[in-house]
Image: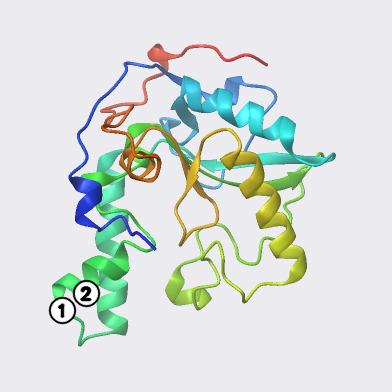
Amino acid sequence: MILLSDRRISAIALGDNGEPMIDLREVPELRIDSRLADPAGAYAHLREGVAQRLLDAQRALPDGLRLLVIEAYRPLRLQTEYFEGYQDELRAAHPGWDAERLHTEASKYVSPPDVAPHSTGGTVDLTLCTEQGLELDMGTAVNASPLASADACFTASPHVSATAREHRDALSLALSGVGMVNYPTEWWHWSYGDRYWALQTRAVQTRYGPVASAGAEQAGRVRG
């Protein structure tokens, strides 16, 4: 399992193709959950090409199922806050861990800010729901930590029900089929064009670099 703390990730060259960000709330085919909504609406912004991939993946799902987007773009400031906060939680639970161990373990749940996938606009946290918006059983809640879930949040965890495994497999099949890659400690985390994607697909550089703002003025369009 390759973690985001791995030095091979940070060694990948940054590139950016200039693709615009779009507001997913303006894409009627996609459901956007508001539990992590911020005043600026950053959480609902995603690169145009990745939004198109989500639409293509949704069409590949079994009948009656839809994607439910929880969070897409995340400003670097917020990423740093999340990472440092989870390190503090781990430090309290494991006072004997040194700084390197804390950094590695924290990266199983929150990306180190210097390689943060969400800050590129190419990464999305999402789950499955019915046509009516009822979330499916995925074995853990979205954003369940390894510490709290006893690692059941790991995509391939054997400690989930057969129903949850079936749902995870359906999500994985649809998203991997459109070229997105999963972070294996978080079944809900999928990305395209960032450093983790580049390592997994052996790309020489990223397609997306960090985005300073998810400003709506950059909005493009995707095909319905």
151 left or right of 60 in image: left
Amino acid tagged 1: Asp
Task: Pick out the residue farthest to the front.
Answer: 202
Q: Residues under labels 1 and 2: Cα distance?
A: 5 Å
The residue under label 2 is which amino acid type?
Arg
* Frontmost residue, 26 versus 167: 167
For mark 2, what is the residue? 101
Q: Is residue 86 visible?
A: no
The image shows residue 100 at horizontal and vertical percentages of 16, 71
Q: What residue is pinned by disc 1?
A: 98
Q: Is residue 206 above or below residue 168?
A: above
Could you tell me which secondary element the residue under label 1 belongs to?
loop
Query: Could you tell me which residue is drawn at 61 percent across and 74 percent down?
Result: 158
In the picture as drawn, the residue positioned furthest to the left comes out as: 99
Q: Which residue is drawn at the image coordinates 68% and 16% (left, top)? A: 224
Q: Residue at x 68, y 22 (%)?
A: 28
Residue 131 locus on image (x, y percent): 81, 39
Residue 98 drawn at (x, y percent)? 15, 79
Q: Residue at x 49, y 22 (%)?
A: 49
State which quarter of the image contains the N terminus: bottom left
